[in-house]
Image (tube, grey):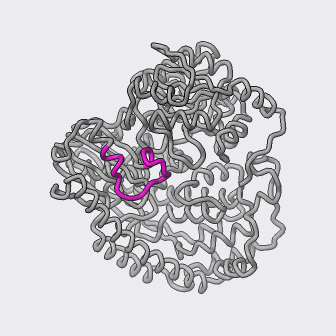
Amino acid sequence: MRVLGISPLDKDSTVSLMEDGRVLFACGEERLSRVKLQSGFPHKALQEGLNRLKWDPQSIDAVAYAFFDWDEEARLIAESVGVDDRLNGPKATAKSCSLYRSKIGTGYAVDRTTRIPGIETEAAEFVPAKAWYKRLTYERMAGSSRLDRRAHKHVFKKWQQAAVDDHRKWSAELAAGLAKFGLDKKPLKRFQHHDTHAANAFYASPFTDALVVTLDGYGSGMCGGVYTADAAGIRNLHRFRFPNSLGIFYEHVTSGLGFKPSRHEGKIVGLASYGDPKHLADVLLERFDTANGDIVIRNGMNHFFTRALSGHWAKRDVAAAYQFVLEEVTRRAVGHWLAKTGKTKIVVSGGVHANVKLNQRMREMPGVDGLFVYPNMGDGGCGSGAAMLTFGHEVMRKASGYDVVYYGPDYTEAEIRAALDKEGLKYERFDAPEDRIAELLAQDHIIGRFNGRMEYGPRALGNRSVLYPAKEPEVNQWLNHQLQRTEFMPFAPSCLAEAAPRLFHHLPGCEKTAEFMTVTFDCTDWMKGHSPAAVHVDGTARPQLVTPQSNPSYHKLISAYEKRTGIPVVINTSFNMHEEPIVCSPADAVRAFLLGNVDYLAAGPFLVPHPKLTENLADRAKTKPGKKRELAGV
């Protein structure tokens, strides 16, 4: 049986083509359109998948989608509005608003003992001042429980109208897109959004018995769910009703600190490690109720509250408070369900679980001995979950969990050579280039690696990656600058899986999910001493564990690097320019290689020195550690 799974069309539209419960091809439309988080019907990705698999559209037995039809979604949204009206009265946030008022002007100062790369001045620690009338609005909406409630209801109503219009639009576009491929006569299976997250989390995991937790912004009237999963199937225990959304909660701080929601939440995670949550955590926690394992956020749609906080407190401390509260609220709610079910393993999916620090805190909860995070945890992964539900439990329990997620397109040697020749680039060809790449890394060269099938999901896992040694802490500043990025998180490390026990604490039960770079771990002293560029200020890192089975070529490369240096770790950051999707094709890789001034491009069997290599190395020598360089601000 063949099933086409399509993720929600509102952002990160993604195709999953599955046969008998196994993913054969999966790709986000953004990788082919080159538009970050591309919305709309995934015409290019679907055509690419059909071409790669040599499938005729008529050979597909069913289409699966991770939302109900627009009118049912509209009904569920209206139902959530009604429940919210009953839960939250006008005095629901009285204590939180009072705490906020009491803290203003109390002599708070920024702790500048730890400098944040990219924040070079005291002024940059704070969100730029708004016009007086905006500041006044934020103050009033945060300091008065009555106005807090009014702002929440106003924003929620506007969101409701826009969401219903969007569902209507995407339902029409889904129908039109399927008709274009002659798939409009095939059965279209629609599913509750969070059920698709639950399915992909459990069926892709290495576990046969687990508590399933899904958390995201919004889906089918809800913003999360709790399930049990075992040999009998997946059963829903509880749903977190919108707008009590931890995804929206985190979007508010992302926006409030001047970043782009749905894109820059990772920056907030990194920034939070520099801050102190104690300044604002009590104000935020007063807005939550987690009784009986539920999550209720009082007046959670009032984004003015966050903007008021960001007008008085430093970015690092606002971020730290939101990160702490996200972790604490999740632990309280999930702890209830762990106690109730007796489960010891957790599998998770949903956009909130892109937060790698949250995932670490869940693994560290008492009684938890295993954690798996779906590799494409956001809505882009829901198409695969919908397809899994279409196959049904009996088929899916026989299909093994994910060994790899290299489900995207690959390219022939001739296609790679043509892209190099088109730009007039000089290159060498190697039957096995891994040893030569390791030699160049040992000489502190930056390598753009383009090899094999592209990764499915948001993480670059060695096949579309920029590689560099992890021994220089300052590399996070100058290499991000060279790639035209501003980041607060350090680069992630790719590590030999067999060396991982001497690099990280508390690995057992998380080995598989660590292959997909979706959780942080506390680093050992050896890791901190030998690969500091991959260690964050709080002593954690977000590794990719590489095995000979998951990626033989990449494992061979890192092994060759270890033989030369004694270090089984290299930096791995996504191969892309700032605000662009990860490269997909040889032409994409060549463009990013040239624009980013990467020293060498390792594309399939070809090794390509940058045309300006000598000049670039001379420039870098002037701006590397010990030299002053101008970094992009935030």
Residue 52, percent across and down?
29, 36
Residue at 74% x, 35% y is 474
Q: What stretch is highlighted in magenta?
A: 30-47
Residue 555 in sight in this render = yes
Residue at 46% x, 66% y is 295
295 left or right, relative to 78: right
Residue at 80% x, 40% y is 629
Image height of 170 relative to 28, above or below:
below
Instruction: Indicate the quadrant where residue 124 lies.
Output: bottom right
Image height of 101 relative to 614, above or below:
below
Instruction: Indicate the quadrant where residue 309 lies.
Output: bottom right
Closer to the camera in the image, 261 or 432: 432
Residue 211, percent across and down?
36, 50
**Image quarter of the N terminus:** top left
Residue 173, percent across and down?
32, 63
**Image quarter of the C terminus:** bottom right
